[in-house]
Image (cartoon, rainbow, N blue to C red):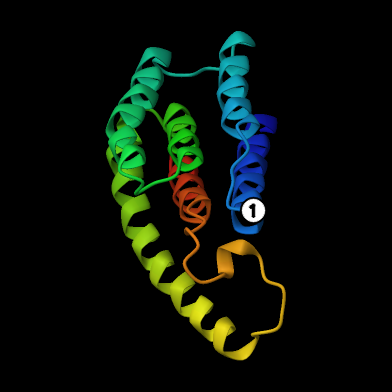
Amino acid sequence: MIATIAFGALLVAASCCDVLRLRIPNLIPLALVALFALQILVGRSVQAPLDHLLAMGLTLLILMPLFALNMLGGGDVKLLAAVALWLGMNKLAALLILVGIVGGIFALFWLAMRWVIRTGLRERKLPRSLQAHAPLPFALPIMIVAVLLFETG
């Protein structure tokens, strides 16, 4: 129960940092990995821990080229890998596919919101993520999908 709350709280923290600063502190994915390891150490039943490590490794392998092509931020890659560790191989395909779908919908919404804000609130100081030509804070769709998949199993 505490681990579940901490998992959600860390995802919320990552999303807030990403929206406000367009950065996900390294401490957040690291804390997710440490919390997962702690669950194993205290005897919490984690089915096939190597399966979970494989999911994290495959996520890094799949997403690193997107980072190298500047299509996805490094913090997003690390956060997704940490989430994949928690969800395991059984949910890896769903995680990556749904993050792509939810991320696309989110991008349309966020870009529209930027346009509305830009046309109506020109003199306001806005978070960098709401300024024109800034990268998108992708931790939000990652959080949404992670919580949905975590709760389904």
Viewer-closest of 138 and 10:
138
Viewer-closest of 16 and 144:
16
Q: Residue furthest bottom?
A: 120
Total residue callouts: 1
Callout 1: few (<14), some (14-19), or many (20+) C-alpha neighbours within 10 Å?
some
Q: Which residue is mark 1?
A: 21
Q: Residue at x 65, y 50 (%)?
A: 17
Q: Residue at x 36, y 46 (%)?
A: 70
Element type at mark 1 = helix
Image vertical order of residue 54 relative to residue 135, above or below: above
Viewer-closest of 29 and 2:
29
Image-based side of 23 in relation to 105, left or right = right
Residue 28's image quarter?
top right
Residue 63's image quarter?
top left
The C terminus lies in which quarter of the figure?
top left
Image vertical order of residue 92 relative to residue 73, above or below: above
The N terminus lies in which quarter of the figure?
top right
Q: Residue type at mark 1: give it.
A: Arg
Q: Residue at x 48, y 19 (%)?
A: 46
Image vertical order of residue 60 relative to residue 120, above or below: above
Residue 77's image quarter?
top left
Q: Position of residue 96 (x, y in %)?
A: 32, 44
Q: Position of residue 71 (x, y in %)?
A: 34, 49
Q: Residue at x 34, y 36 (%)?
A: 91
Q: Position of residue 69 (x, y in %)?
A: 30, 43
